[in-house]
Amino acid sequence: MAEYDDTQYNNSNRAFLQAFIARSILTFEEAKPILAAIFTAHEKRETLTEDVTQSDFNSYISAANNAISPFDLEIRSTYHQTTRSRIYAIVNSTSDPITQLATIHSADEISFLKRVLDAMFETYNTARHEVMAITSMQAVKLHKAPNEDIRQTQNGSETQGSAGQSLTMIQAEKMLKTLVEEGWFEKSRKGYYSLSARALMELRGWLFETYNDLDDDDDEVEDEDRIRKIKLCYACKEIITTGQRCPKKTCPCRLHDICTQNFFRTQSAKKCPICKIDWTGKDFVGERAAISTESKKPKRRSAGAAIVRRQSPIAVEEEEEAGDPAEEEDE
């Protein structure tokens, strides 16, 4: 397209921004029919979806960014961790994202959300099992607020949304569904909830501040004393919650599955770029870390009953550590 006037902000730009705001997130493929309809109305002749170019899209994104910047808003983009499709979202550039959620959700719902995030990035994110995802059953069990539901960040301040009353189990289930519909959570085929690409992009600073040491700006240094729950992909430098990890438990190297394809293609050997041991591709980050744990755990029978006792990844980790305390030293 070349006949529309892109030198000033006009009604076509306003229509695009309104459509963007209504959807919260947008990809180029999703934007093409929107722009085609806008071009058709603006130019008084039909424009086909396939006629819309990436240049057209970039131009409208740039114009929209300039229009919303006075309101402390901006359009940011990131790549989906598994599909690598580029995702655009309108985010608040100044205020705490959890505070933003409080404008449409109650304090009790925000408190529940915070407990779910703590479960994702603390309870189910350990040195051995970096799941960073939570099942529906695990999440619903968090509907009840503990007596002291106050957690502090690494700098000692109280976490936003930490105070609140309990939800019913039905309310908790509804909140999970709403978070998926609003684009904050994704639900996998196996029933695991995790943060969406939009959420990782908008909550990036908050996640680092809440779950990592504040001076943790070097993701390639091995330091067991530092709290580093949120890690970056070694190749693309984006937050990683699903992908692969170095077999050495103390090594911080992580790679998205798609990033490994291009990364190791340029390497002479398939070795960890930090500690240089062989990269197996069988050590996972994300829900596969939980699934692989369940496939390895021994079946236990009590008093001859044919009932297998199920364990959480954390319970398995504790047993492994108790049974082989020297494993880390060997590695």
Image (cartoon, rainbow, N blue to C red):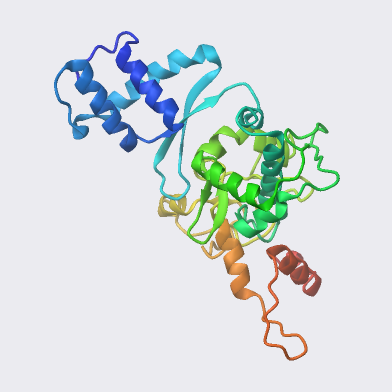
Residue 259: x and y in percent read: 45, 49
Residue 123, image x, y percentages: 72, 54
Q: Is residue 9 left or right of residue 127?
A: left
Q: Is residue 134 visible?
A: yes
Q: Position of residue 21 (x, y in %)?
A: 44, 26
Nearest to the observer: residue 320 or residue 191: 191
Residue plotted at (68% across, 83% down): 307
Q: Residue extending furthest top? A: 8
The residue at 47%/54% (across/down) is 257
* Number of numbered labels in the structure image: 0
Extreme residue in the left direction: 45
Name the residue furthest right: 147
Q: Is residue 25 left or right of residue 111?
A: left
Which residue occupies the foreground of this view, 114 or 283? 114
Residue 283's image quarter?
bottom right
Closer-to-camera residue (326/137)? 137
Does 105 sit above or below residue 8? below
**Quadrant of residue 210 in the image?**
top right
Name the residue: 54% across, 53% down: 242
Front residue of 274 and 233: 233
Above or below, comparing residue 203 to residue 310 in the picture: above
Q: Quadrant of the N terminus?
A: top left
The residue shown at (27%, 32%) is 33
> On the picture, is 153 further left or further right than 39?
right
The spot of residue 311 in percent (x, y) is: 70, 70
Q: Quadrant of residue 324?
A: bottom right
Q: Is residue 194 above or below residue 248?
A: above
Quadrant assignment for the C terminus: bottom right
